[in-house]
Image: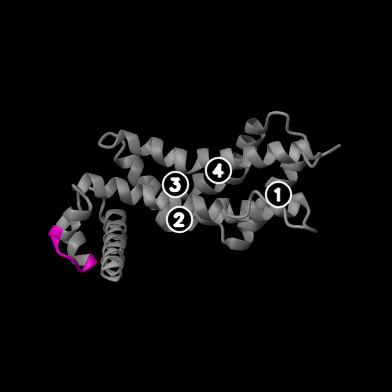
Amino acid sequence: MTKSKTVGTTRTGRKRQAILEAAAELFLRQGYPGTSMDEIAARAAVSKQTVYAQFSSKEALFVAMVLGMTHAAGDQVQHGLAELPAGTSLADHLVAYAARQVEVARTPQLMQLRRLVIAETDRFPELGKAVYEGGPARAIAGLAAAFARWNEQGLIRAPEPEVAASNFNWLIMGDPVNRAMLLGDAAVPASPALRRHAREAVRVFMAAYGPE
């Protein structure tokens, strides 16, 4: 009995994931109005009834897709931030974090997601807030918590860690994200240039916030 239930739950989870992946592919390529539940079901290789069993409406599926992508990207960025590895300087640790953040954020899928959410703001006003909270706000909150601890340890001078975190976040993200959003994905520099950008952002940050 227990085994059958576990298998069924796993199968349901796989179908749900297939639906979300199909929705992401189609919504990002065709937009919200241009994508139908029939297309999503066909792409996911499930019935339309199965799609509706998992998501009550096209709107609910769209919201779940956007939030899922946002949280997954946030998890990638936040991984390893809180712990400073033994023998690693704070500057090097921040360069690794900054490079990871900008690499994740500039992926074509996430850039297209931002454009899609902006295009659908009137239809889904809560999504812009959710993407902000799961993206920039989450990154800044994670940085602020780390900066508060490092401030106590004397590794940086950040008596207002939230302000320092916001400054650091936009030093990293401002130029690459604006280039991608306004000039297209091809305008974003390649990985080596992004790492140089990350290193320079950390140099500027440490000049302002590093220990005396």
Residue holding disc 2:
185
- Amino acid type at circle 4 is Ala
The kind of residue tagged 3 is Met
Q: Secondary structure at mark 3?
A: helix
Query: Disc number at residue 181?
Result: 3
The location of residue 41, given as percent across then percent down, is 18, 62
The residue drawn where x is 22% and y is 54% is 54
What amino acid type is highlighted by mark number 2? Asp
When the figure is inspected, residue 59 is found, relative to residue 93, above or below; the finding is above
Q: Mark 2 or 1 closer to N-term?
A: 2
Among numbered discs 2 and 4, the one appearing first in the sequence? 4
Q: Is residue 195 left or right of residue 181?
A: right
Q: Nearer the viewer, mark 2 or mark 4?
A: 4
Query: Are the two marked residues, 2 and 3, in contact with CB atoms closer than 8 angstroms?
Result: no
Label 1 residue SS: helix
Of circles 4 and 3, the one toward us is 4
Give the distance between the C-alpha atoms of the residues marked 2 and 1, in whole angstroms. 22 Å
Q: CA distance from mark 4 to mark 3?
A: 19 Å
- Tag on residue 200? 1
On-image quarter of the N terminus: bottom left
Measure how far apart labels 1 and 3 are at the Cα level.
22 Å
In terms of secondary structure, where does tag 2 sit?
A: helix
Mark carried by residue 139: 4
Q: Earlier in the sequence, mark 1 or mark 3?
A: 3
Q: Are marks 4 and 3 in contact (CB under 8 Å)?
A: no
Q: Please, what secondary structure does the residue beneath circle 4 have?
A: helix
Residue 8 colored magenta?
no
Q: Nearer the viewer, mark 1 or mark 4?
A: 4
- The extreme right residue here reads 212
